[in-house]
C-alpha cells in the first residue's frame, strides 16, 4: 500500500494493526517460520517505509511473544508457539528453512529497538552454522538440524532454500559488514552450481533439484523441480549485481576464507575451479538466466499460462549389465550442468552456454496430443496447482533490474496477463487447482503480487542497492551499525 501510494487503504490498515490481538486458544500454535516472514517482516517493513511507530511497537511485542520457541539447548527455534500462554512445541529435528529464515527480521529489529535479546536470536543461529561440520555438503547448509545440540542431523541432504537467500541478504542489509554470512553464501552457491544444477535430456532445461542420501550413504538427486526453487535465479543475479565476485579480495575475502578441506570438503577447490575457468560473476549470472528461463517456460507451456507448483524432470535411461546378479541394471540420470559447461568450454565455448539457448514453449492443442507428446516438455506435473507464489516473478523482476534486458519484463507481462485471465475474481485473485485446465478451476487462497507491480514501473522505489527483500517480499533498508550498537551487540 505504501509502495503503491494507496493512502486510504493504508489508513485502514494502520487501524487494523492497532486493534490486532496476538492471541490464540490454548490448544493452537502459530508456526514460527510463517509468522516471522509474514507478520514480523511485514510490520518491520511497514515501519521502514512509513516511520509510523505503531508498526515498530507491534513488531517488538510480537517478537517477544514468539521468544519461547528459542527455549532449546542450542538456541535454535522450535516449530511453533502459543502467543497467549507461551507454550512452544516442535520435534527435536528442525528443517533448515524453518529455523534459519530469521536473520533479517531479528537483526533489523535489534537495530531499531537497541535490544540485545533480538540480536542474539540471529547471532546464535549464525554461530551454530559456523561451528557445524559441513564436509559432506562442501560448506552448504544441510536440510535437517538437531535443535538440542545445534548440529546437522543429516549432513548429506542438500537443498536450495530461503536460508541460503538470507545469507547474502544479511550481508547486504548490514552494509556489507557480516562477512561470515557472505562466506557461507559463497560456499552454498558453489555447492549448488557444482552439484544441484542439471540439464533435461531433450530441451536442455536448466533446473535445480535437491540431493538426498540412501541407507547406504549414497547421494542421489530427486529430479523434483519446485516452484519455490525459482527464487534461486533472482538470488544468483542479485549476488552477481551487488558483489565483486571476481575481486573478492577487495572485500577482505581470500581463497582461504572459503574454507579448508577438513572443514568444508571440496568447497575451496570447487570455488577456485569456477573462478579460474569461468569467472564467478559470469557463471552466477549464466546460472541465473538459464534457471529463470526454465521457470518461465513452465508457465508458458501450460494452457493457462501459469506454472505448476512441482514438476518431476524427465531423465535419461542408462543400462548396465550386473555380472553378479546376471541382470540389466537401469539407472535414470541427467547431465550435471557443470559437466556440460566443461564440455562446452573444451569445445571452444561456441554458441550460448548449455541451458541458455533460447527455447520456445511446448503447447498441446488437445489431450490426445498431450498424451502422445508429453515427453517433449521434459517434465511431468507432480503438483499441478498454481498457488500465486512470487518466486518466478521475483526472479524476472531482479533480472530485469540487473540486466536491463526487456525480455524479462516481457515474460513477466505474459504471466500478468495469464493471472488476469485465469485467476481474477470479483474480490481479488485466487489460486488454481490445475494449470493444465483452462478456464481454470479456482481455490480460495490469495498470496501477494507485489513483484509484478515493481516489474512494470520505470522508477524503482526499492532500488536493489539500498533495500533487501525478505522471503515474503517485505523490503528492509540497508543500514550501518553505530559505534554504540557495535559495543552493545559485541560486533
Image (cartoon, rainbow, N blue to C red):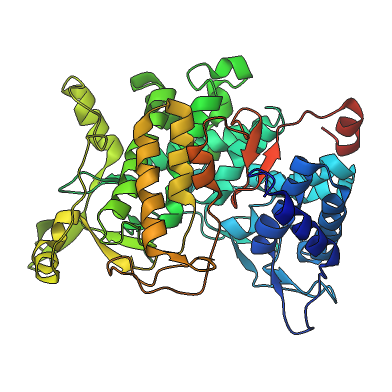
Look at the picture and state if 221 lies above or below 468: below
The image shows residue 420 at horizontal and vertical percentages of 41, 58
Q: Is residue 316 left or right of residue 15?
A: left
Q: Quadrant of the C terminus?
A: top right
The image shows residue 258 at horizontal and vertical percentages of 54, 29
The image shows residue 229 at horizontal and vertical percentages of 43, 51
The image shows residue 352 at horizontal and vertical percentages of 23, 28
Q: Residue at x 17, y 22 (%)?
A: 350
Q: Is residue 300 left or right of residue 96?
A: left
- Closer to the camera in the image, 165 or 303: 303
Look at the picture and state if 171 lies above or below 198: above
Q: Residue at x 57, y 16 (%)?
A: 249
Q: How many marks?
A: 0
Q: Residue at x 36, y 68 (%)?
A: 383
- Closer to the camera in the image, 414 or 392: 414
Q: Which quadrant of the view contains residue 479?
A: top right
Residue 337 can be seen, yes or no: yes
Q: Is residue 327 left or right of residue 58?
A: left
Look at the picture and state if 315 lies above or below 193: below
Q: Is residue 62 left or right of residue 155?
A: right
Q: Which quadrant of the view contains residue 484?
A: top right
- Closer to the camera in the image, 146 or 442: 442
Look at the picture and state if 160 lies above or below 88: above
- Closer to the camera in the image, 9 or 54: 9
Q: Residue at x 28, y 52 (%)?
A: 300
Residue 217 can be seen, yes or no: no
Amino acid at each position: 500500500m505504501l509502495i503503491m501510494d494507496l493512502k486510504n487503504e493504508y489508513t485502514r490498515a494502520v487501524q487494523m494493526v492497532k486493534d490486532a490481538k496476538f492471541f490464540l486458544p490454548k490448544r493452537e500454535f502459530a508456526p514460527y517460520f510463517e509468522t516471522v516472514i509474514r507478520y514480523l517482516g511485514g510490520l518491520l517493513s511497514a515501519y521502514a517505509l512509513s516511520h509510523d511507530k505503531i508498526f515498530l511497537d507491534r513488531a517488538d511485542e510480537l517478537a517477544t511473544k514468539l521468544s519461547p520457541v528459542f527455549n532449546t539447548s542450542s538456541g535454535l527455534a522450535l516449530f511453533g508457539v502459543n502467543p497467549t500462554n507461551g507454550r512452544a512445541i516442535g520435534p527435536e529435528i528442525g528443517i533448515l528453512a524453518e529455523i534459519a529464515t530469521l536473520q533479517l527480521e531479528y537483526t533489523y529489529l535489534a537495530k531499531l529497538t537497541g535490544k540485545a535479546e533480538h540480536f542474539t536470536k540471529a547471532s546464535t543461529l549464525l554461530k551454530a552454522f559456523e561451528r557445524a561440520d559441513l564436509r559432506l555438503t562442501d560448506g552448504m547448509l544441510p536440510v535437517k538440524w538437531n535443535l538440542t545440540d545445534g548440529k546437522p542431523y543429516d549432513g548429506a541432504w542438500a537443498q536450495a532454500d530461503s536460508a541460503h537467500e538470507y545469507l547474502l541478504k544479511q550481508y547486504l542489509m548490514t552494509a556489507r559488514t557480516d562477512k561470515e554470512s557472505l562466506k557461507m553464501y559463497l560456499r552454498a552457491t558453489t555447492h549448488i552450481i557444482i552439484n544441484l544444477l542439471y540439464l533435461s535430456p531433450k530441451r536442455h532445461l536448466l533446473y535445480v533439484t535437491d540431493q538426498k542420501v540412501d541407507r547406504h550413504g549414497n547421494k542421489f538427486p530427486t529430479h523434483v523441480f519446485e516452484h519455490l526453487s525459482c527464487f534461486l535465479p533472482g538470488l544468483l543475479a542479485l549476488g552477481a549485481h551487488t558483489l565483486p565476485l571476481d575481486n573478492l579480495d577487495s572485500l577482505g575475502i581470500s581463497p582461504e576464507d572459503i574454507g579448508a578441506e577438513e572443514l568444508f570438503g571440496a568447497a575451496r577447490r570447487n570455488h577456485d575451479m569456477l573462478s579460474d575457468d569461468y569467472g564467478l560473476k559470469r557463471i552466477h549470472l549464466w546460472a541465473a538466466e538459464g534457471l529463470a528461463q526454465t521457470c518461465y517456460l513452465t508457465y508458458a507451456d501450460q494452457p493457462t499460462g501459469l506454472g505448476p507448483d512441482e514438476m518431476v524432470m524427465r531423465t535419461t535411461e542408462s543400462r548396465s549389465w550386473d555380472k553378479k546378479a546376471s541382470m540389466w541394471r537401469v539407472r535414470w540420470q541427467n547431465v550435471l550442468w557443470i559437466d556440460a559447461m566443461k564440455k562446452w568450454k573444451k569445445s571452444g565455448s561456441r554458441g550460448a552456454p548449455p541451458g541458455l539457448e533460447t527455447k520456445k514453449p511446448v503447447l498441446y492443442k488437445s489431450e490426445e496430443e498431450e498424451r502422445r507428446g508429453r515427453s517433449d516438455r521434459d517434465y511431468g506435473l507432480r503438483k499441478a496447482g498454481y498457488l500465486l507464489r512470487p518466486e518466478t516473478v521475483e526472479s524476472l523482476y531482479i533480472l530485469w533490474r540487473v540486466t536491463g534486458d526487456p525480455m524479462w519484463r516481457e515474460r513477466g507481462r505474459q504471466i500478468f496477463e495469464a493471472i488476469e485471465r485465469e485467476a481474477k475474481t470479483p474480490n481479488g485473485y485466487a489460486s488454481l487447482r490445475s494449470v493444465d485446465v483452462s478456464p481454470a478451476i479456482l481455490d480460495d487462497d490469495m498470496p501477494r503480487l507485489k513483484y509484478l507491480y515493481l516489474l512494470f514501473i520505470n522508477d524503482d522505489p526499492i532500488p536493489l542497492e539500498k533495500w533487501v527483500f525478505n522471503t515474503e517480499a517485505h523490503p528492509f533498508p540497508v543500514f550501518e551499525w553505530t559505534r554504540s550498537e557495535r559495543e552493545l551487540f559485541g560486533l
